[in-house]
């Protein structure tokens, strides 16, 4: 198994997690803190834990956003749950949908009104047994806000598709993604609703976790959701990401999907579930702000653990390691 990097893009705007474009993990950079965290920072001595991270050259970018894709006008300092390089914003006439509109969207075959669902990684409808059979078929889309538009599957590959809206690739030129049943809210919580689907570009953590082997159909929805929390370092399960673009993590599990990478630079970080960290040894980055270490607000209440075996009694099946790194908060 290869070590995994984390990158960013987006669906519903989150507080922090990504750094500006053009910076690699090895660059001199800072961690963007929200005002609330500055006001409520906790001294490291009281908590006894630190925020960490790391990077390796040449590793594959992994993504800290849920859906992936980035709008040109998106705040590059924040991780979001939507975006879309190919579609800057929904047009006034409603014919073009941005990636954020494709979170918890209802699809149907435009010609027949037959509902379209996600089943074991395939889009299916009456008369259409798989995604390939829906290629170039106009699909009516109704967003969670009631906006009506259309989308088309324009290409199908193993495990991914190209999706267009208003004639524009949702994930950018040549970009691909996946559909997953249900939707996500601003806190990163998943609603398992079989009547709606969410589209994620390949650089979003929803799609990344599918690619890593934790799809809801290969494992289950809870494991996939735990993977999205891990990828974004969302310890508190509140949608706030405590990681940076380009951070390397070693992800492994008790399911036989991914194995721990033997690398002495990496230390155990946390075990994960659908609501965030189940227990933790430390955090991905040690963020220093005016001499104080800033920590996620839930960290003090989390049980401590030093291995996935320690967390097994609490039902954990997924964990990660990372390389300890100290970073200054942005001024």
Image (cartoon, rainbow, N blue to C red):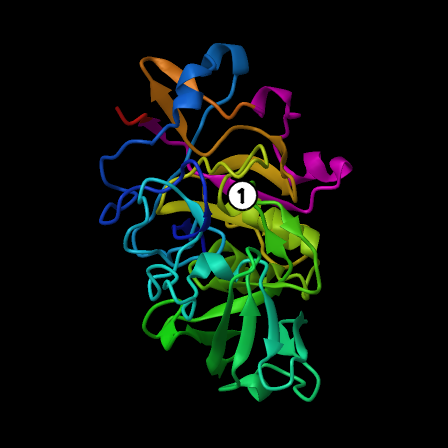
2 up-or-down from 309: above or below: below
As drawn, is 302 to the left or to the right of 314? Answer: left
247 within the magenta span: no
Foreground pick, 227 / 174:
174
User: Which residue is at a point 44% across and 22% down the rendered structure image?
Assistant: 36
Residue 223: give x, y in percent of width and height.
Answer: 66, 52
Asked which secondary structure carries label 1, the reply is loop
Whether residue 18 sits left or right of residue 322 in the image: it is: left
The percent position of residue 18, horizontal first and vertical second, equals 36, 42
Q: Nearer the viewer, residue 213 or 73?
A: 73
Q: Which residue in the structure is indicated by mark 1?
A: 186
Question: Does residue 317 lie above or below 145 as drawn?
Answer: above
Task: From the viewer's perspective, tell me whether residue 48 is left or right of residue 36.
Answer: right
Q: Is residue 4 visible?
A: yes
Residue numbers of the magenta segment:
298-327
Q: Say which quarter of the image contains residue 290.
A: top left
Residue shown at the point (75%, 41%) measured from the top left: 315
Q: Residue furthest front?
A: 93
Image: 286 above or below 214? above
């Amino acid at each position: 198994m290869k070590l995994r990097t984390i990158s960013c893009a987006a669906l519903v705007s989150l507080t922090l997690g990504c750094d500006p474009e053009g910076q690699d993990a090895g660059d001199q950079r800072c961690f963007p803190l929200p005002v609330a965290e500055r006001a409520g920072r906790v001294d490291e001595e009281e908590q006894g834990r630190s925020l960490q991270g790391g990077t390796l050259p040449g590793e594959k970018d992994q993504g800290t956003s849920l859906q992936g894709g980035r709008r040109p006008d998106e705040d590059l300092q924040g991780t979001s749950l939507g975006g879309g390089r190919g579609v800057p914003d929904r047009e006034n006439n409603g014919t073009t949908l941005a990636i954020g509109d494709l979170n918890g969207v209802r699809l149907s075959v435009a010609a027949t009104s037959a509902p379209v669902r996600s089943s074991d990684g395939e889009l299916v409808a009456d008369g259409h047994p798989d995604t390939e059979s829906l290629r170039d078929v106009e699909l009516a889309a109704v967003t969670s806000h009631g906006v009506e538009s259309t989308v088309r599957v324009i290409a199908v590959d193993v495990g991914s598709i190209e999706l267009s809206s208003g004639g524009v690739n949702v994930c950018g030129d040549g970009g691909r993604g996946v559909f997953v049943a249900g939707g996500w809210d601003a806190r990163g919580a998943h609603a398992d609703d079989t009547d709606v689907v969410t589209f994620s570009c390949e650089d979003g953590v929803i799609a990344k976790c599918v690619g890593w082997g934790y799809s809801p159909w290969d494992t289950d929805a809870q494991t996939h959701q735990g993977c999205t929390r891990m990828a974004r370092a969302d310890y508190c399960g509140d949608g706030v990401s405590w990681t940076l673009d380009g951070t390397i993590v070693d992800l492994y599990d008790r399911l036989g999907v991914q194995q721990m990478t033997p690398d002495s630079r990496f230390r155990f970080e946390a075990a994960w579930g659908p609501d965030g960290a189940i227990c933790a040894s430390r955090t991905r980055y040690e963020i220093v702000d005016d001499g104080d270490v800033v920590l996620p607000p839930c960290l003090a209440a989390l049980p401590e653990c030093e291995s996935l075996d320690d967390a097994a009694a609490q039902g954990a099946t997924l964990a990660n390691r990372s390389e300890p790194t100290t970073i200054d908060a942005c001024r």
